[in-house]
Amino acid sequence: MSFATPLHAAVVALGLIASGASNAQTSAAPAPSSSAASTANAPSGELRQQQALGVLSAINQAEINAGQLALSWARTEPARQYAQTMIRAHTENEKMLAAWKPDRSSAPAQARTTEAKAEAAALARHQGAAFDSAYLQAMVKDHRKALQTLDDSLLPAATDAQVRAFLQQTRGHVADHLAQAERLAGTPATGR
């Protein structure tokens, strides 16, 4: 798919992002524990966990949408392969996450979504090799930020053992994604 102008690309990218959370599907995912079954009567710690999961959902959607944009724009096979990996991995994570009913409407989740829209618009201003470079640099930045968010906010908010295990597993995948993006972008590894 080719876009006539960077402005048209930005409109398409923002449309992809806007469809974000509504495209999440459920599949065979770990069953949520009974303590996470209802947030309506949940203690404040439980609500906090659901908000944290909403942030992870926003991160997933941002990576899926950026990957879709990259599949349309990237010129090099390594960037295209990385984009496909991000789409596949973050879609699977999103499917598994759905079992715990993340709060995608929370302020932190909405803030992450807003950041992703701005990043997509910035990416869409690039063409050719400059796009590939900008995409890979964005993936380095995004995955570093995702690791920090997991460590500082999401994991501490996990009150359910299954959710905590899921977030730990997710952290491992994000670290792998970061290492791959750093290698492709020629960016020094952070050792996270």
Image (cartoon, rainbow, N blue to C red):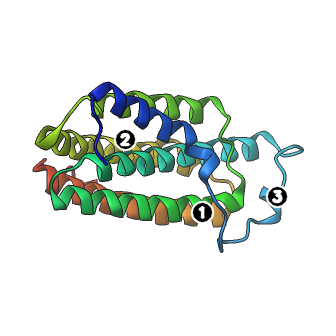
Relative placement, left or right, of 176 versus 129 is right
Distance (Cα) linking label 3 and label 1: 17 Å
Q: Nearer the viewer, residue 92 or 22?
A: 22
Crowding at mark 3 (Cα within 10 Å: few <14, some 14-19, many 20+): some
Amino acid found under the numbered disc labelled 3:
Ala
Distance (Cα) linking label 2 and label 1: 22 Å
User: Residue lying furthest front in this view?
Assistant: 4
Q: Which mark is residue 37?
A: 3
User: In which quadrant of the rendered view does residue 28 lie?
Assistant: bottom right
Query: Which one is earlier in the sequence, the residue at label 3 or at label 2?
Result: 3
Location of residue 45 in the rendering, given as x and y in whole percent from the top left corner:
73, 44
Q: Which mark is residue 145?
A: 2
Q: Secondary structure at mark 1?
A: helix
Q: Which mark is residue 95?
A: 1
User: Residue lying furthest right in this view?
Assistant: 41
Location of residue 20 in the rendering, given as x and y in whole percent from the top left corner:
55, 44
Amino acid found under the numbered disc labelled 1:
Lys
Relative placement, left or right, of 117 versus 28 is left
Residue depicted at 43% across the width and 64% down the height: 89
When the figure is inspected, residue 114 is found, relative to residue 70, above or below; the finding is above
Q: Is residue 119 visible?
A: no
Residue depicted at 42% across the width and 36% down the height: 12
